[in-house]
Amino acid sequence: MNLSPLPLAVFVADADGAITSWNRACEKLAGYTADEMRGRTLADLVEFEDSAGKQAAIQARVDTDSLASLVCADGRRISVRVTVAPQSLDPEQPGSFSVIVVPRAGTAPSRYALIQDLPVNDIIEGLPCVFYVIDQSGRLLLWNRQLEEALEMPSEDLPTVEVKYFFDEAHRAETVQKILEAFETGSAWHEAELVGRRGKRTTYLFQCARTSVGSLPCVFGTGVDITMRKQAEHVLKVHERAIFASVNAICITCCDGPDNRIEYVNPAFERITGYTLAEIKGRDPRFMRIEGCDTEEQQRIHDALAHRQSVRVVLRNARKNGEMFYNDLRIDPVMNVNGEVTHFVAVINDVTEARHYERRLHHLAHHDPLTGLANRTLLQERLKQAIQFALRNRMIGALAFLDLDNFKHINDNLGHDVGDAVLREIALRLRANMREEDTVARVGGDEFVLVINDQNSPEQVADLVERIRRSVAGPVEVDGKEIVAGTSIGVALFPRDGNTVDKVMRAADAAMYHAKSLGKNNCQFYSNELNRMVHEHLLLEASLGRAIGNREMVLGYQPKVDLRSGRMIGAEALVRWNHPEHGLMGPDSFIPLAEQTGLIVPLGEWVIDEACRALKALTMLGVEDFVISVNLSLRQLRQRQFVDRLGDSLRRHAVPPSCLELEVTESLLMERPDEAKAVMARLKALGVQLSIDDFGTGYSSLSQLQAFPVDHIKIDRSFLGGKVDNGHGVITRAIIALGHSLQLKVIAEGVETREQLLFLRNNDCDQMQGYYFSPALSEQGLADMLHRGVTLQA
Ligand SMILES: Nc1nc2c(ncn2[C@@H]2O[C@H](COP(=O)(O)O[C@H]3[C@@H](O)[C@H](n4cnc5c(=O)[nH]c(N)nc54)O[C@@H]3COP(=O)(O)O)[C@@H](O)[C@H]2O)c(=O)[nH]1
């Protein structure tokens, strides 16, 4: 009987237990060859586990299932279940038994027992890699489909080519050397790139071992496609090199512990911080922080790391040499393939220079380049903060506007360099008088502003401002010259005078305006009364603009008398405003306003034209050689069209130019002497007469006086005040003598008494005007007086 096809391990034994035949499965399971099986008994091969053991006759086990151990050829024992069945149905073999041996669950067959049944071809073809067997000539003996695909070659071509030619030229020598190594040592491995016939390139990890096919030595092995891995490695290497070469410092920390130990830092990190990897590996990266600095940012980092999140902050860190640097730090979590955060990568950008640059830009945008003080932008910010602080804390704050009194004069006469030096010195003095928390700003040429915080009372502010006024009023020395700037100060308190930047600024401005109008070098606080005045001033300004058109302006004419003949030789035109609400207003209440607003220009033109008209009217009445003088302001003189327009007026009214006299105050001439000289020369060429008004108050020198092409000087009223035999008399005499020495006529104004008149006559003064003879008259009044031939009586 042929038992071979039976899948179960089965052998046949006779009644004595002698084994007579067996199947292949039995050989595989126990590992015996046919020769080894011959002559053995059941007792040799099976050790029953029951109490009957070896002694039990085979018949006794018929139709029972016994647990036993199968004794293998190599001595191992396999747990099996044994079933004995009589073969009585087989007439040729009476008394023989089939012994069926089934390995029990969990019992592995011999390592090699089943190998012969393996479908080797299928396995080789099914391998997830290339397979090859190479002989000593370096040619393929056996290979799988995967190798054909990699080489893009038909099966029949493969054995015809030496295997080294399957590789890129660069890998051939190494490939041959590795095959030889396998032949010599038994195994070898290497990585190399197979190049397909159509150019496909695939990188493999080859591992081979020596074997033989019959007596033919050969090498067999596999090649696993590692192209993807290689690419990944390449990418990793590029990343690694990029990190290495990065200009930004990179720090990688491991987060398996509580303190994020440093695992890696790149060269840029070393460059920026001064620390080498060797020095800081394993340390908590917080070692670079500056104690007490950027606590908010530190907390944000802490929170982000705790939640495994990204974070970006700018904070201050310390380099190894102790120097502080601004670190624009970005930290991101790094995950493994399972999505677990294992590391953090921190990119450190040293932004110290950029920060300093930003600061410089910010400083430039918020400070005055000449003095280094805050500019208007910063002033407004600071004032806003100060007002809010005062409101919150129920404190008083103050805003002081300072305007230098003589700066224009300093700049025009001593030059801009001197002017700059004065401004710098004033800035220093202001700073010296203020506390760090206060603000000193320069908001215009000679305008300074102080924000004074945290004051207890208006009196405290007043003391401080007065100290500042005195400090600014002190002489400034520039190039050995002592210069006095002086200042007018307007102060507003907040929140009392306003609770917004705009309101407080307006209040301080109004106060300063008031300070200026009261004379220079003084300080004024804002008040409701002041507010009312400012308001009225604004209204006045608006109505002044309309006054000329509305024919509200009128001229009064104060006669001028020749002191020798006692005859009226002229009159001074003095403007008045017949205001619809306020009645007749003197020039002192609106000329300064007209000067400030520029309205003096149209007003002055009107005065000249009106004076010319009056002159013409007097001529028509038969008055001859009569001169009318008008007062001029600096702004009028500076008008480019002034001389031409004046000529137009004279021509229009057909008035001889010599009948018109222009009075310019001495101080006004001294403000811009060169400019004044040039205009006066043109006026003189036109033929009008010129007079210096308020002479003696403007500090002009003799040489300067000579340079002005004038006809008269008018002694200021103040020199005739009171008794003329006091010191003033001396000055008046000196002015008369001076005028005469320059061939100028001298006129005295403001003559009120006979005593003054006699003094002037005795001292050879040429002309007079004043209440003693007549106040200013209407045009009609003047005409009547002239008509009556009224003369001066001593
Ligand atoms: N730019 C212009 N300025 C003008 C014009 N009209 C006048 N003014 C200037 O206004 C100032 C004040 O002038 P007013 O109030 O008219 O005073 C003049 C006289 O009324 C006054 N005066 C004349 N006599 C006496 C006197 O005996 N005693 C006394 N106390 N005052 C007297 O003096 C003023 C004239 O001064 P002055 O001009 O210096 O001759 C004044 O400065 C005018 O200049 C104008 O149209 N444009």
Image: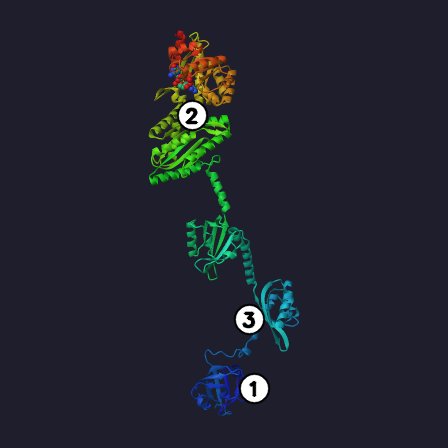
Residue at the disc numbered 1? 35
Q: The residue under label 3 is which amino acid type?
A: Gly
Report the Cα–Cα distance between label 3 and label 2.
105 Å
Name the residue tied to disc 2.
Answer: 596
Q: Quadrant of residue 258?
A: bottom left
Q: Secondary structure at mark 3?
A: helix
- Distance between the Cα atoms at labels 3 and 1? 36 Å
Residue at (54% x, 55% y) in the render: 244
Describe the element under mark 2 as helix, strand or loop: helix
Q: What's the amino acid at mark 1? A: Asp
Mark toward the start of the polypeptide (3 vs 1): 1
Can the viewer see residue 554 in this picture?
no
Depth check, mark 1 against mark 2: the one in front is: 2
Position in image of residue 366 (x %, y %) = 46, 38
Q: From the viewer's perspective, is residue 271 above or below residue 14?
A: above
Of badges 3 and 2, nearer the viewer stands 2
- Would you say the beta carbon of the disc 3 residue lies within 8 angstroms of ligand 1? no
Give the spatial CA distance, label 1 vs label 2.
138 Å
Please name the residue that numbered disc 3 is placed on. Answer: 126
Contact (Cβ within 8 Å) of mark 3 with mark 2: no
With respect to residue 90, does 514 lie above or below?
Answer: above
